[in-house]
Image (tube, rainbow, N blue to C red):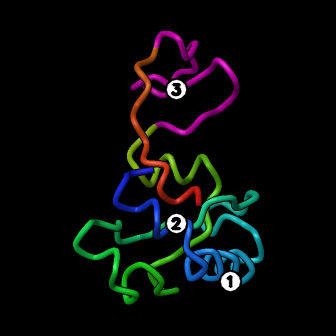
Amino acid sequence: MRAFAKAFYESPAWRSTRAYIIKRDAGLCVRCGALGVIVHHKRPLTPSNIDDPLVSLNENNLETLCRACHAIAHGAAPPIADGLAFDENGNVVEAALMPRPQIDDDEFY
């Protein structure tokens, strides 16, 4: 989690909103229907907008995602199984052969 967002993701307002969004989306990923575990900000939070509830807490800017769809939303390859990944051609390869993309963990909270 980025340092500027730590207090926000620990706040009662976020925890309440997160619970509401998961309930609204029936606990399912809105993109694929799998178990949803992350409430994702469609418009990413930044230091300049994190205190704007029209961005940070707006239900129209939030969606429940599974880990795979969340990775895709952040431009990373989705995990497929322990030790496996897709290469740039869509082939399954050992993950040790693939560079690991960095993913912000902001929406995990």
Q: Nearer the viewer, mark 1 or mark 3?
A: 1
Amino acid at dot 1: Tyr
Give me the C-alpha separation between circle 2 and circle 3. Answer: 31 Å
Name the residue at 55% across, 39% down. 78
Q: Which mark is residue 9?
A: 2
Q: Which mark is residue 106?
A: none
Give me the C-alpha separation between circle 2 and circle 1. Answer: 15 Å
Crowd class of label 1 (few under 14; some 14 to 19; many from 20; radius 10 Å):
some
Name the residue at 62% across, 68% down. 64
| Farthest residue, direction left | 48
Name the residue at 76% across, 58% down. 35
Amino acid at dot 3: Phe
Specify whether residue 48 is painted magenta.
Answer: no
Give me the C-alpha separation between circle 1 and circle 3. Answer: 34 Å
In the rendered image, which residue does mark 3 sit on?
A: 86
In the rendered image, which residue does mark 1 sit on?
A: 20
Q: Nearer the viewer, mark 2 or mark 1?
A: 2
Q: Nearer the viewer, residue 11 or 98?
A: 11
Q: In this picture, is 16 found above or below 75?
A: below
- Answer with mark 1 or mark 3, whichever residue precedes in sequence: 1
Q: Nearer the viewer, mark 2 or mark 3?
A: 2
Give x and y (percent) for residue 107. Answer: 52, 60
**Magenta residues, start to end:** 77-97
